[in-house]
Amino acid sequence: MVLLKKGQSEVIGLVIIVLILIVVGLIFLKFYLSKENSNKESISNIKANNLVNAIKSVSICNNNMADAIIACCTKKEFCGKDACQLINEEINDILEKSLEEIVYFEAKQQNNLCLSINNDCQGISSTENLIRNQDGDAKIRVKICY
């Protein structure tokens, strides 16, 4: 067995300590960066849900947007105009003024897509919101695109 001199054994110990510190630092960095991404996703999810709630409560012709969306899905007129065209104009105006991100909006009735604004994309989606009136119901959601 080869005997190590005192200086050589101290250097080996120092190298082991440095390697342990590097591994601990990398683990810390991984958790720190993943936490930052989850915070960003949480904020985007909150923005998307708030935007859906804002869209539902917008007033058009002394009615709310939810009634106009259901009129679009049931192929009826709203305020003397084509409901889908009116909603498209109003929601595009809201989206331009509200967020800097690209936003996709959709409305479904009985799982059939009846209204879509912008192209579907990868991103953070709001929860589906059920809107209902005497003419029927629909589900709406917003997706904030990456």
Image (tube, rainbow, N blue to C red):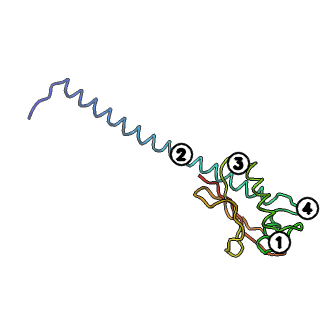
Residue that lies at the very extreme toward the top in this rendered image: 7
Gap in angstroms between the C-alphas marked 1 and 3: 29 Å
Above or below, 9 against 89 in this view is above
Q: Which mark is residue 62?
A: 4
Q: Nearer the viewer, residue 104 or 31?
A: 104
Of tags 3 and 2, the one toward the viewer is: 3
Residue type of the residue flagged with mark 4: Asn
Q: Which mark is residue 99?
A: 3
Q: Is residue 128 left or right of residue 33?
A: right
Image quadrant in which you'd find residue 131: bottom right
Residue 86 spot, x, y in % from top left? 81, 63
At horizontal 70% and vertical 56% (from top left) the residue drawn is 49
Gap in angstroms between the C-alphas marked 1 and 2: 41 Å
Gap in angstroms between the C-alphas marked 3 and 4: 25 Å
> Does dot 3 land on a helix, a strand or a loop?
loop
Residue 5 spot, x, y in % from top left? 15, 25
Gap in angstroms between the C-alphas marked 4 and 1: 15 Å
Residue that lies at the very extreme toward the right in this rendered image: 62
Q: Are marks 1 and 3 in contact (CB under 8 Å)?
A: no
Residue type of the residue flagged with mark 1: Asn
Image quadrant in which you'd find residue 142: bottom right
- Dot 4 or dot 1, earlier in sequence: 4
Residue type of the residue flagged with mark 3: Leu
At horizontal 63% and vertical 58% (from top left) the residue drawn is 125
Gap in angstroms between the C-alphas marked 2 and 4: 44 Å
